Image (cartoon, helix red, strand yellow):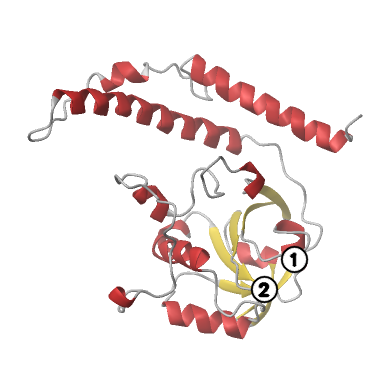
Amino acid sequence: MTLPVEIRDRRDAKFKTNACVARLITENRMADNTILIPAAELAAKNKAHFPNESPEYRQARNALLAEEIELRRNIERVAALRRALPPGGRIPEDYTFQGPDGAVRLSQLFGDKDTLVVYSMMFGPQRERACPMCTAMLTSWEGTARNLRERVALAVTARSPIERLLEFKKERGWQNLQIYSDTQGAYTRAYVTADDGDVPGLNIFTRSDGTVRHFWSGEMSGEMADPGQDPRGAPDADPLWAILDLTPAGRGTTWYPKLEYASLTTIR
């Protein structure tokens, strides 16, 4: 069976990207061809020691440190490849959202920036309450948004009416996140899910000489999850999970964020 040209091109591009990353790792190089000192050699320079640790602990910790160095390098390699993507497609229309002051176009969400980050949260009109996972991540973003907006524009969208979204924003105490309603759903169907399903989406757009293009989208679907793991992108956009990954118990398999906690009534 012959694959359609578009699918074949995407497949070939994926293979080329994977081969490029693998070659860079094997050759201890970054995407800009900088030659790197082997991670194990760097880890051997580690002078950290803590009270009462055993020799076995220190040996295992230094071995882990070498892997952490490789992880850091691979994150940067992938980020460099992401930045080097060819221009994405032009947006087919300048989508209209509803904001606190009325209708606003996608192009207007850029403000004075040339990059726009749009997160689509799971809070459609069919939901009684917003998705706890989306809410947890956006609550983390609320703090970093003050700094993030110095570099890029940031917007949050959802399918619920704007009045409902603004009420929820007030409830959560969000001051730095700008939230908009995709009332008609045209943007959601084009860039989140074609069937207008209740799923989240993260998209990056660029603007140059008045032309708005799609740059990147989180495309790791549930079908791409590894055994025993929840579907998620890499790197994870929610710092909650990155911190839990540092702990002995890790992320766990049964705990998920909630909208309210009886033991933390003053923390939203």
Residue at image location 51% in from the left, 45% down from the top:
229
Q: Nearer the viewer, residue 125 or 181?
A: 125
Find residue 237 and report its horizontal and vertical position in percent.
Answer: 49, 52
Quadrant of the rendered image containing residue 189: bottom right
Q: Is residue 218 above or below residue 48?
A: below
Viewer-nearest residue: 258 or 236: 258
**Image coords of residue 218 (percent x, y):** 62, 49
Q: Contact, CB < 8 Å: mark 1 with mark 2?
A: yes
In the rendered view of the protein, which quadrant contains the N terminus? top right
Q: Position of residue 58 (x, y in %)?
A: 19, 26
Kindly identify the residue that appears in the image at 56 percent across and 17 percent down. 23
Identify the residue at image location x=53%, y=71%: 178
Q: Amino acid at mark 2?
A: Arg
> How many discs mark residues in the rendered view?
2
- Element type at marker 2? loop
The crowd level at tag 2 (other Cα within 10 Å; few <14, some 14-19, many 20+) is many
Residue 94 falls in image quadrant = bottom right
For marks 1 and 2 on the same chain, the one whose residue lies earlier in the sequence: 2
Quadrant position of residue 98: bottom right
Residue 221 visible to the viewer: no
Residue 266 point in image, percent of width and height: 30, 78
Q: Quadrant of the C terminus?
A: bottom left
Name which residue lies at 51% across and 44% down: 228
Residue 159 is labelled as 2
Residue type of the residue flagged with mark 1: Asp
- Which residue position is annotated with label 1? 196
